[in-house]
């Protein structure tokens, strides 16, 4: 099965006290990470998103199900 690229929205917030960046995926709230720089935080949350999707796929297969793509157009 070919892997398709998907687009996700992330929230990126810099902590004024530590200077570190917190990153969270809006569509997958459990995909969170951080980094010393914006670039590092984005790279780390990308990896977190990949791990969450992999975990969801495995969990779905264990239960005899599957994941499906659904496209919804906003009005």
Image: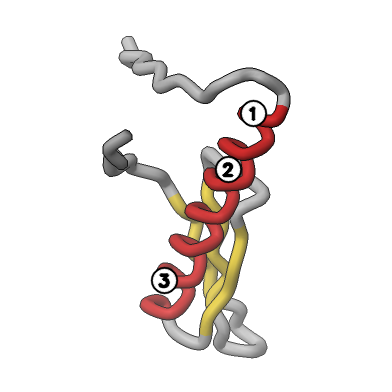
**Residue shown at 28%/43% (left/top)?**
5
Write down the residue under mark 1: 60
Image coords of residue 39 (percent x, y): 37, 77
How far is the residue under mark 2 from the one under mark 1? 16 Å
Nearer the observer, disc 3 or disc 1?
A: 1
Image coords of residue 14 (percent x, y): 53, 75
- Tag 3, which secondary structure? helix
Q: Is residue 72 above or below residue 10?
A: above
**Residue shown at 44%/84% (left/top)?**
37
Observer-nearest of 68 and 15: 68
Circles 2 and 3: CB distance less than 8 Å?
no
The coloring applied to the image is secondary structure
- Mark found first going from the N terminus, 2 or 1: 2
Observer-nearest of 15 and 42: 42
Residue 28 numbered tag: 2
- Mark found first going from the N terminus, 2 or 3: 2
Q: Please tell me how crowded label 2 is: few (under 14), some (14-19), or many (20+) other residues with Cα within 10 Å.
A: some
Circles 3 and 1: CB distance less than 8 Å?
no
């Amino acid at each position: 099965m070919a892997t398709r690229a998907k687009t996700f929205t992330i929230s990126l917030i810099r902590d004024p006290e530590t200077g570190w960046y917190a990153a969270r995926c809006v569509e997958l709230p459990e995909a969170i990470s951080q980094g010393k720089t914006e670039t590092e935080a984005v790279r780390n949350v990308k990896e977190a998103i990949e791990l969450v999707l992999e975990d969801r796929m495995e969990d779905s297969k264990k239960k005899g199900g599957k994941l499906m793509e659904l496209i919804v157009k906003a009005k």
